[in-house]
Image (cartoon, grey):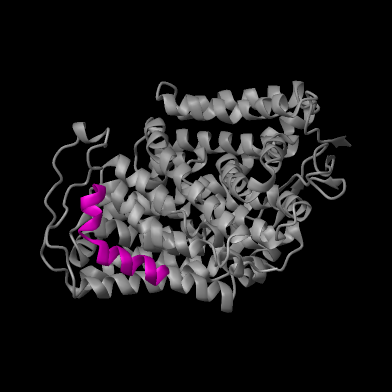
């Protein structure tokens, strides 16, 4: 057995600096734009191993095994989702169904700002609720680039929009993970998150349009933005507090999409915004050609169904794949759990991160049938057959998709290697303890701890599992509500989703904008920091200021 060490240098500040070196190096290399993302990720994996072994005293064999576990987990399930989403997109382009979809969306509105609300926010929230784990950014990024948005707009805005729904993603998986490590009731945790995030579900649609079109561009369509935000935020609060935390995103997104589409039947902006580029700041706009004029001919009923059919199939399959009953059935048929030798249960998480020494599991769960990516592949195959593809042609198209995504899949796997190794070596926990030492300001910095966890791991679920118990222990020591701070970990975490390297690579892959990950990171970073700080300030109000304190559940 090896016990994690959280202050290996005997000085909390120096140990924190050492723990931060791998992730800071990764972000700096990517943001520089001079190092390709997959090279930056590989360098960061090597550096993380060196820090874990020589600073945090992790045995070298364990460090290497943890990295290999992360590499495999990077492909299954995350890379597997991205690969099959892009495969479906390629099929719809080849059949002309995507061109019909563009006309269908244009039939609702040609205004780019309103298309953003419909696709990036509401439609993306549905996929977050149904499957999560990279699916919404992959889908909405591909759809937006197909609609003519610039690569930076499609990538960056999909990332910003995919924030407010994240805490309830994949049928409430982050809430369940948080409940598991804290021992708190998932219904109470879900309700508390539902008293924090609706405020930001109102803000994020305004924020996305402002980031795209500027203040005036946002102001000119404020009624539609308000309808989108309110019709998502109210159901998010009601479902999370009075029904359950599992179906929050699905219910809220469907209501939001329906309300926006109905509203646009009676209201349209005075001037249509037809530019696909980010106003005044799109680094790719200078090399773009003018957008091709969209065919404005109304779709026939059969054309409309043809355009929507692949996505209807995806929605149905994702809803089935996301249910607990299906996962239980699928896993009973096909499950291969591989406990990594000399790693599984051989590392102890110790106080103050855990209440008592707790073995860390290291199992690769190959539950192939229940993987979200497998559901996406099945949806793509069904769509391909219905569109008239032969098996041979689909295999050929799949081969092209693998070639298209190869570098990105390597990058995603390397990112997960970093996340897995930092978790098992205790590097993440050292960073977390630095946030936990902020005393009366802990509600603010504890929220940012959730943001840091997602930025490091790429997952709100992983961040909750990593820091959830630390939030509980620290809040109890400071006399704060453990429910408040556990929920704040999840709510703050959603704003880290847009800057985690894994999500950025997914976005660049979906938009076919390889090699520009640094541009995307530079664009979204300031938005991520600003929104995370706003969540932290709101949690501070809930912790100390009446009447916000009345919102806190015990």
491 displayed left or right of 223: right
Tell me, yes or no, whether the highlighted magenta stretch contains residue 226. yes
Looking at the image, the residue that sits furthest to the front is 546
Q: Quadrant of the C terminus?
A: bottom right
Residue 169 shown left or right of residue 526 in the figure: right
269 on left or right of 31? left
In this rendered view, identify the residue nearer to me: 32 or 198. 198
Q: Quadrant of residue 524?
A: top left
Q: Inspect this view and state whether residue 251 appears.
A: no
Q: Quadrant of residue 221?
A: bottom left
In front here: 5 or 399?
Answer: 5
- Residue 27: horizontal and vertical position, in percent? 51, 30
Q: Residue furthest bottom?
A: 242
Residue 536: % across, % down: 55, 50
Q: Specify whether residue 256 is painted magenta.
A: no
Highlighted magenta segment, given as a residue range: 213-232
Point 34% across, 66% down: residue: 228
Task: Judge whether residue 531 can be spotted in this image.
Answer: yes
Dividing the image into 4 quarters, which one contains the N terminus? top right
Residue 521 pos. (x, y %): 42, 36
Q: Residue at x 18, y 71 (%)?
A: 267
The x and y percentages for residue 36 are 44, 25
Q: How many marks?
A: 0
In the rendered view, does 525 fall on the left or right side of 104?
A: right
Secondary structure predominantly adopted by residues drawn in magenta: helix
Residue displayed at 27% across by 32% down? 283
The residue nearer to you, when weighing 546 against 130, is 546
Out of 25 and 390, give the one closest to the viewer: 25
């Amino acid at each position: 057995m090896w016990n994690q060490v959280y202050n290996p240098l005997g000085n909390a500040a120096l140990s924190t600096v050492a723990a931060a070196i791998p992730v800071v190096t990764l972000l700096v290399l990517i943001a520089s734009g001079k190092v390709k993302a997959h090279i930056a990720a590989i360098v960061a994996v090597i550096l993380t191993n060196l820090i874990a072994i020589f600073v945090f005293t992790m045995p070298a064999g364990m460090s290497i095994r943890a990295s290999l576990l992360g590499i495999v987990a990077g492909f299954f399930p995350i890379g597997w989702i991205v690969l099959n989403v892009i495969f479906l997109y390629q099929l719809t382009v080849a059949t002309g169904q995507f061109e019909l979809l563009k006309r269908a969306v244009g039939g609702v509105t040609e205004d780019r700002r309103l298309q953003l609300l419909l696709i990036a926010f509401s439609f993306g929230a549905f996929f977050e609720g149904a499957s999560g784990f990279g699916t919404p950014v992959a889908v909405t990024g591909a759809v937006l680039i197909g609609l003519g948005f610039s690569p930076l707009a499609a990538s960056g805005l999909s990332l910003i929009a995919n924030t407010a729904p994240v805490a309830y993603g994949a049928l409430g998986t982050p809430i369940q993970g948080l409940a598991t490590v804290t021992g708190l009731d998932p219904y109470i945790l879900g309700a508390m998150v539902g008293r924090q995030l609706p405020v930001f579900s109102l803000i994020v649609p305004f924020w996305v349009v402002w980031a795209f079109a500027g203040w005036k561009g946002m102001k000119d369509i404020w009624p539609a933005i308000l309808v989108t935000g309110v019709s998502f935020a109210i159901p998010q609060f009601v479902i999370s507090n009075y029904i359950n935390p599992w179906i929050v995103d699905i219910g809220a997104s469907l209501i939001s999409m329906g309300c926006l589409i109905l509203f646009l039947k009676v209201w349209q902006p005075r001037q249509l915004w037809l530019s696909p580029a980010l106003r005044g700041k799109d680094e790719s706009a200078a090399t773009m050609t003018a957008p091709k004029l969209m065919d404005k001919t109304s779709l026939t009923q059969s054309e409309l169904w043809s355009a929507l059919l692949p996505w209807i199939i995806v929605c149905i399959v994702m809803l089935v794949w996301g249910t607990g009953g299906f996962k239980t059935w699928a896993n009973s048929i096909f499950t291969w759990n591989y406990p990594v030798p000399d790693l599984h249960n051989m590392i102890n998480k110790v106080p103050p991160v855990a209440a008592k020494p707790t073995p860390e599991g290291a199992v690769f769960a190959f539950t192939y049938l229940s993987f979200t990516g497998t559901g996406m592949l099945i949806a793509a195959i069904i769509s391909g057959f219905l569109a008239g593809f032969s098996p041979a042609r689909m295999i050929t198209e799949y081969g092209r998709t693998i070639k298209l995504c190869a570098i990105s899949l390597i990058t995603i796997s390397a990112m997960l290697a970093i996340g897995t190794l930092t978790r098992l070596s205790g590097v993440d926990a050292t960073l977390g303890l630095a946030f936990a030492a902020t005393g009366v300001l802990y509600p603010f910095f504890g929220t940012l701890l959730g943001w840091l966890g997602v930025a490091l791991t790429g997952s709100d679920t992983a961040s909750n599992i990593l820091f959830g118990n630390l939030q509980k222990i620290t809040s109890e020591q400071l006399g704060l509500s453990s429910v408040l701070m556990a929920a704040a970990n999840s709510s703050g975490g959603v704003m880290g989703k847009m800057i985690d390297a894994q999500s950025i690579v997914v976005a660049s892959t979906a938009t076919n904008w390889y090699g520009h990950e640094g541009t995307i990171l530079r664009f979204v970073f300031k938005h991520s920091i600003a929104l995370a700080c706003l969540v932290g300030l709101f949690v501070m109000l809930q912790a100390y200021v009446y009447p916000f304190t009345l919102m806190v559940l015990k």
